[in-house]
Amino acid sequence: MTRHRSLSASLLTTSIQGASILAACCLIGGCSGDDGPGQPQDPQPQRVVAELEGAVADVQLAAGVTSTLVFTLQLPPDLAPVTAAEIDVAATLDHVQVDGVPLWRLIARKAARLFGGDEDLGATAFIRVGDDPATVCEAGILYGPFTVSHGTSLVVDPETAAADGPTLQIINSGTTVLCLSVTANIDAEFSVDAVAMDLVEGECDAPADFAGTWTGTYQCGNSCGEPFSGDVTLTVTQDGDEASYVDQSGDTYTGRICGDTFHFERIDGDEIERGTMTLDGPGSATKRSTWRGTSPPHCSGDCVDVLTRADPGDCPPLVITSGQPPNGRVGQPYYFEPATSGGQGSVSRWAIPTVAIPGLETLSSGVLTGTPTAEAVGSWEVHVTVYDSCPEGAQTVNRDYTIVITE
């Protein structure tokens, strides 16, 4: 199982009205003041809808019983440090379902009639924010209560939530853990698929040097089974504030370096992982991330890696020795594998068409293979990237080719 800068401490507030639940939601917040005429304008907040990727799905609530959920939220890695943020609870409720029915539709139909009741039902929620799933419910920063009720429309109190300074520090650390406690007036099942928020970004410090090979150990939680752990090797390639790394499984993570923190993500068809790698010193770092499955049962977990950078050494230059890849013909098997010389340690290769060539695919080893289809006739650009594990700073070599597919 694989394991992306993401900012997200939010307050998640959900609800049931009539028979609907408000379960409560995420907090991230802060406000910017008004400097008055003639003063520099405050940065304008941007609206972000943070996908929860199945973290809150089909949660069972029992009437009058407090239910507690612990989950991790993260924002995409291309955001600068957040100086202020505010959750839009009303907009978040647009992403809530109760017993499989969108909350807005539930209200429009008059939820009490739908559930066979006529009293004004609602819910109360509290949230704690921290950076450790094991302690957040006891020691996290407390926000709330948040309540919801219904009549002809939703009534949410308060409608927004703002984070204090310590909460913003947690958000900018890259991993924000939430403990959500909800007490509803009826039995129901609820899900939340996103949180709406307004964020104000600040400025990044100059990027630190992360390039090189890092080794160490990792430990990961698993909501669907036993936790897992093992040894890890990461090869980081850096160009200014842009960076990527390849792990020992050949998986590639990409992102941005802001000061001494590398914010990264990896998204594939089955799983999403986001997190941060933070320098503790020139040769040591701690990596924290959250992985989450994209389909039911939406297994997930938090990971912590303790890493040491390999000592610098002399690395033979890495060279791509492949000549022009073969051209192909429709209906006939095709195969091209980039070849290299030099370098140090393991070498990873990618032969990636600029535009997907119908019938061909790039394997994890970098091999371009398959059988071109009739739609593939024409010229196709292919970009080959090769990385090694040089401890001086993972060498990277690129080369562009053109492949012609004929009938």
Image (cartoon, rainbow, N blue to C red):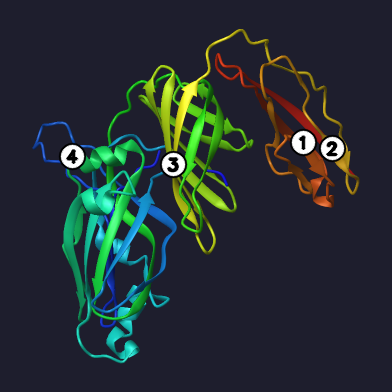
Marks 2 and 1, Cα distance to the nearest angstrom? 7 Å
Badge number at residue 335: 2
User: Which amino acid type corresponds to the residue marked 1 in the rendered image?
Assistant: Val
Crowd rating for badge 2 (residues with CA inside 10 Å; few <14, some 14–19, many 20+): some
Secondary structure under badge 4?
helix
Secondary structure under badge 3?
strand
Q: Earlier in the sequence, mark 4 or mark 2?
A: 4
Q: Where is residue 25 in the image (x, y as percent from the top left)?
A: 28, 60
User: Which amino acid type corresponds to the residue marked 4 in the rendered image?
Assistant: Gly
Residue 83 appears anywhere in the view: no
User: Which amino acid type corresponds to the residue marked 3 in the rendered image?
Assistant: Ser
Q: Quadrant of the C terminus?
A: top right
Specify the quadrant of the image occupied by residue 388. top right
Which residue is label 3 attached to?
A: 289
Crowd rating for badge 4 (residues with CA inside 10 Å; few <14, some 14–19, many 20+): few
Residue 209 appears anywhere in the view: yes
Q: Where is residue 329 in the image (x, y as percent from the top left)?
A: 89, 42
Marks 4 and 2, Cα distance to the nearest angstrom? 56 Å
User: Residue at the spot x=55%, y=29% of the render?
Assistant: 234
Question: In the image, is 314 to the left or to the right of 212?
Answer: right
Badge number at residue 165: 4
Q: Earlier in the sequence, mark 3 or mark 4?
A: 4
Badge number at residue 235: none
Specify the quadrant of the image occupied by residue 202. top left
Which residue is label 1 attached to?
A: 367
Secondary structure under badge 1?
loop
Q: Do the residues labelled 2 and 1 touch (CB within 8 Å)?
A: yes
